[in-house]
Image: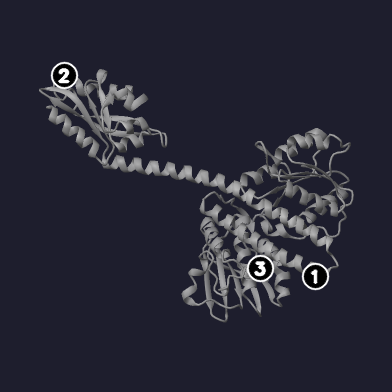
Amino acid sequence: MSSDGLENARRLCLASSLPALLVVGPPDAATALCNDSLAALLDRPEAVRRSREEAEAPLVLGEAWPAVATALVPLYAGLAGGTADSVLLSLPRPADGGTLGLRAVPLTEQGRVVGVLAQASMDEAMANLAATMRAEVERTTAARSRFLASASHDLRQPFQAMRLFLDALGAQVAGNARAMRTTEMLGNAMTAGEQLLNALLDISTLDAGTVTPDFQTVSLDGLVESLVEEFRPQAEEKGLRLRVHLAGAVTRSDPVLLGRILRNLLSNAIRYTRQGGILIGMRRRGPRWRIEVWDTGYGIPKDKLDVIFDEFHQLTNPSRDPTRGLGLGLAIVRRLSALLNAPVEVQSRSGRGSVFAVTVDGAETDAAAEPAGPAAADGEGPAGVPLDGMTVLVVDDDSMVLTGLRLTLESWGCAIVSAADMREVFAAVDGLTEPPDVILTDLRLPGNVSGFDVIDRVRRLFATAIPAVVLTGETASDALLEGQRRGCSFLHKPLHPGELRREMEGIRAARGRTGETRPG
């Protein structure tokens, strides 16, 4: 091959849209040239800089060169063509830990091999492109998950502080009708903001693909009954009848996520029904169960049956009044439906009402079936249990939230010991002669410390299983499992003081029944 031949090979290497490599000279004294596509796949920025000129092969290919040089030996043996017509080069692919294959052929000049041109096949290139894209998607998903976990916590913190301060303000202005009215309007505005924040974070988390269903045997009767009891006060306040038809149904699903689907459907049915009522019932359809929510509300035009599942789409709220919903409930339902393989259908007549149906797989009756799942999470706790004299260790690194919690708990008669980090925890409990009655801690604390670390250390310090309540804006299943293992309760931010009160009353009542701290 003449110098013109090597120059043609060089141009071919650089112009190729597929990964390509040119090696000039014998393996023990070779120079190399790789095109931009190969340099990018090998993650070799120095090779990219040299992609328009040849350089010493070890500098271009780095640690991959010794194996490449060994693989090229059969091409150089003997006369032109050596002992092999071609060889397969295998180069490491840093993006995903795999390998990149190039088919190498000899370049000859006057009966001797003067170089090698190697190129990936189209199939190989496509496979490498797919692998690179998968690796990039995995990196992006992991980064998005970390962002959502942080955002979920950080964005909920100020709402949590405002909610606690609002509760304390309400107690201070009690009896002043004008101030109470202003406080009520402020509460409504905060509720709308909390709903929007929660819905946006829910949708972002679902879109990120970080939610993994926990499938288990679930009693649909128990789940539906608890939801009906939760929504009955709202229905009665509007003068609506809320009826339920049970069928002894059992399914395999995630009770938390399925409960969120049904909760959104019931909430919408009540919101968009002015008179009449709502019925939730179940029908058997072969091996599956169909859970139906009927209402006598506004109804939905036929041409709008699909778009109602789009984000921020509301048929009866053109002025975007946040007190009438945010248009995200059905968007969340659609995502959860796909996640659980639980198709959602809708039928409606304008002015007559609608029926939304969720179809789930049937399952054999199991005595251990989850009776109510998450629907009971907002249920009422023991009523009227006094909290006077309870000692509460409160840990949160947000000073506004910590102050708000202190004001709220002190208004209930609790004695507060507060801390912002682990160092302050030890200083705070050092003066206690008895263990606190409750540990109330944020999940995320400074210095890679978690609320679980606080709970474990304080329990070991007092050698007793102190009841613990974890406050968090996160919904990751691994955190919930960690808390369950320790016997902790969870309250999700931004929580309403009433939820915290019910949890505290439950702890006081349980201790009163047993005469000792409940086990963890």
- Looking at the rendered structure, the secondary structure element under dot 3 is loop
Labels 1 & 2 near each other (Cβ < 8 A) = no
Q: Residue at x 60, y 54 (%)?
A: 254
Label 1: how many Cα within 10 Å (few below 14, some 14–19, many 20+): few
Question: Considering the image in quadrants, where does the C terminus appear?
Answer: top right
Image spot of residue 50 (x, y percent): 30, 30
Query: What's the residue type where badge 1 is placed?
Result: Arg
Q: CA distance from mark 1 to mark 2?
A: 101 Å
- Give the residue number, with chain letter if any, for mark 3: 246
- Give the residue number, with chain letter if any, for mark 2: 78
Q: Is residue 13 left or right of residue 291?
A: left
- Give residue 264's quadrant in the image: bottom right
**Nearer mark to the viewer, of 2 and 3:** 2
Q: Residue furthest left?
A: 110
Camera sees residue 463? no
Q: Earlier in the sequence, mark 1 or mark 2?
A: 2
Query: What's the residue type where badge 2 is placed?
Result: Gly
**Nearer mark to the viewer, of 1 and 3:** 1
Query: What's the residue type where badge 3 is placed?
Result: Leu
Q: Nearer the viewer, residue 58 or 293?
A: 58
Q: CA distance from mark 2 to mark 3?
A: 85 Å
Q: Residue furthest bottom?
A: 351
- Looking at the rendered structure, the secondary structure element under dot 1 is helix
Label 3: how many Cα within 10 Å (few below 14, some 14–19, many 20+): some
Q: How many marks?
A: 3
- Give the residue number, with chain letter if any, for mark 1: 178
Q: Earlier in the sequence, mark 2 or mark 3?
A: 2
**Nearer mark to the viewer, of 1 and 2:** 1
Q: Which mark is residue 290?
A: none
